[in-house]
Image: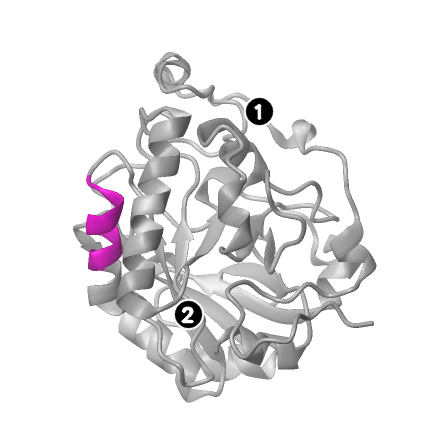
């Protein structure tokens, strides 16, 4: 019996009846290490979350490309032969940002990539200079693509950032080739882990972004996050799972336990390198289900 509800355009997608979806793994405690950058631990503690779970140093806010999806997981330089076998069960994909520069999309598609998320914006001032080449180039070669926004909840409201995102490439169209925009919300790349917000304030910020994005596009955004960040910085808020597809980040052999509220994931980012440029992802379903996700 397939795990798909009859719907022309479901708000969240499509659990696939696979062993991967139903596995509940041990929490990712072995991945969580303390940040060695001086002064960060104390500041993070004041924000309602410790620096545990971050494996990458703070970024220079003057950097030309900002942060990226998976920044805070650090770099997992495992051999390609060690990639999880379960990552091949769905549809292969990738995500890129300005750090990848101009992408050879013909080559990526020939290697098997069928979808991508592309960083469009960060906060309310940053636009990726290579977004047009990445977003339009992937579409040109026949891939399904979507845009993502790197959230900075301490600099402006969720509504302001949602508007900035939609106005600069993060919209959605019912063309069968465009994924709903994604909100990348993870460890603060420039300061305290939870951006100085309490769990209640963070949940309200995400709601503000989501409701504004939906009002502008007709879709709920996907949420990109890690289990540790979500459970710490939102206090394990469960209400978003009913309407927001989960794009979960976890580098390892299994997708593991999910953030609070979600019973399954839609996309899994499982490594920061591999066959395709940028980060490696898999969609938890068939190609037909991926196409349905765009509608």
| Residue 50 point in image, percent of width and height | 47, 19
Give the dominant element type of the magenta stretch: helix, strand or loop. helix
Query: Who's the residue at 55% across and 81% down the image?
Result: 109
Residue 66 in the image: above or below residue 180: above
Q: Can residue 38 be seen in this view?
A: yes
Q: Name the residue under label 1.
A: 33
Q: Is residue 64 visible?
A: no
Give the residues in magenta.
156-164
Q: Earlier in the sequence, mark 2 or mark 1?
A: 1
Residue 225 in the image: above or below residue 53: below
Residue 257, picture quadrant: top right
Q: What element carries label 2?
A: strand
Residue 281, picture quadrant: bottom right
| Label pair 2/1, CB-CB below 8 angstroms | no
Q: Name the residue under label 2.
A: 146
- Left or right: residue 259 versus residue 158 is right
Q: Nearer the viewer, residue 259 or 283?
A: 259
| Residue 202 point in image, percent of width and height | 36, 33
Question: What color scheme is it?
Answer: one colour
């Amino acid at each position: 019996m397939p795990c798909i509800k009859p719907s022309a355009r479901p708000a969240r997608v499509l659990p696939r009846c696979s062993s991967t979806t139903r596995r509940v793994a041990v929490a990712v405690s072995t991945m969580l290490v303390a940040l060695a950058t001086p002064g960060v631990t104390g500041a993070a503690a004041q924000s309602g979350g410790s620096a545990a779970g971050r494996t990458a140093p703070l970024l220079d806010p003057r950097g030309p490309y900002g942060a990226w999806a998976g920044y805070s997981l650090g770099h997992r330089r495992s051999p390609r032969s060690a990639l999880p076998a379960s990552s091949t069960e769905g549809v292969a994909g990738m995500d890129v940002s300005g750090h990848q520069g101009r992408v050879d999309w013909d080559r990526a598609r020939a290697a098997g990539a069928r979808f991508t998320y592309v960083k469009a914006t960060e906060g309310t001032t940053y636009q990726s200079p290579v977004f047009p080449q990445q977003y339009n180039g992937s579409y040109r070669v026949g891939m399904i693509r979507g845009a993502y926004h790197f959230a900075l909840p301490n600099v402006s409201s969720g509504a302001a950032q949602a508007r900035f995102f939609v106005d600069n490439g993060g919209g959605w169209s019912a063309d069968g080739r465009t994924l709903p925009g994604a909100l990348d919300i993870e460890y603060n790349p420039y300061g305290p882990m939870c951006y100085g917000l309490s769990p209640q304030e963070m949940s309200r910020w995400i709601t503000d972004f989501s409701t504004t994005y939906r009002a502008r596009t007709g879709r709920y955004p996907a949420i990109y996050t890690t289990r540790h960040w979500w459970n710490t910085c939102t206090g394990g808020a469960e209400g978003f799972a009913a309407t927001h597809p989960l794009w979960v980040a976890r580098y390892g052999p299994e997708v593991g336990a999910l953030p609070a509220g979600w019973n399954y994931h839609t996309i899994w980012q499982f490594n920061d390198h591999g066959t395709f440029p940028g980060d490696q992802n898999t969609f938890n379903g068939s190609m037909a289900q991926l196409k349905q996700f765009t509608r």
